[in-house]
Amino acid sequence: MATLTKAKPAEWLGNGMGNTTAEWVVVGFEHIAVRKLGTRWAAIDTTKPAGNGGIAFADTKADLLNKLDGLAA
């Protein structure tokens, strides 16, 4: 299974501003970010231009990690 490390912790932005979710990267492939976008999890290649880096999407983080394992095989 792919291993993640936290690149950025969750952060509270202040009253009325909400918060941000934590950001994760795949160990050994630090250019692949794993983020929760709305209600879904996404693996994004950060070396690609914005909007073109989507690698895989899933409803849960565990399902996304399984998909990433399938891509690496």
Image (spheres, rainbow, N blue to C red):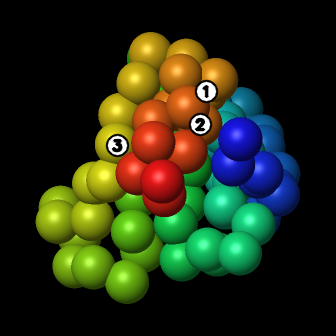
State the SS at label 2: helix
Q: Amino acid at mark 1?
A: Lys
Front in this rendered view, residue 53 or 28: 28
Q: Which residue is mark 3?
A: 56
Residue at image point 54% right, 77% down: 31
Which residue is more in the foreground, 45 or 9?
A: 45
Q: Position of residue 56 (x, y in %)?
A: 34, 43
Residue labelled with disc 1: 61
Q: Is residue 36 above or below residue 68?
A: above
Q: CA distance from mark 1 to mark 3?
A: 11 Å
Q: Tell me if residue 70 comes above or below residue 44 in the rendering.
A: above
Of the residues under marks 3 and 2, which one precedes in the sequence? 3
State the image coordinates of residue 40 (x, y, percent, origin top left).
42, 23
Q: Which residue is mark 2?
A: 65
Q: Residue at x 75, y 66 (%)?
A: 27
Residue 31, visible in the rendered structure:
yes
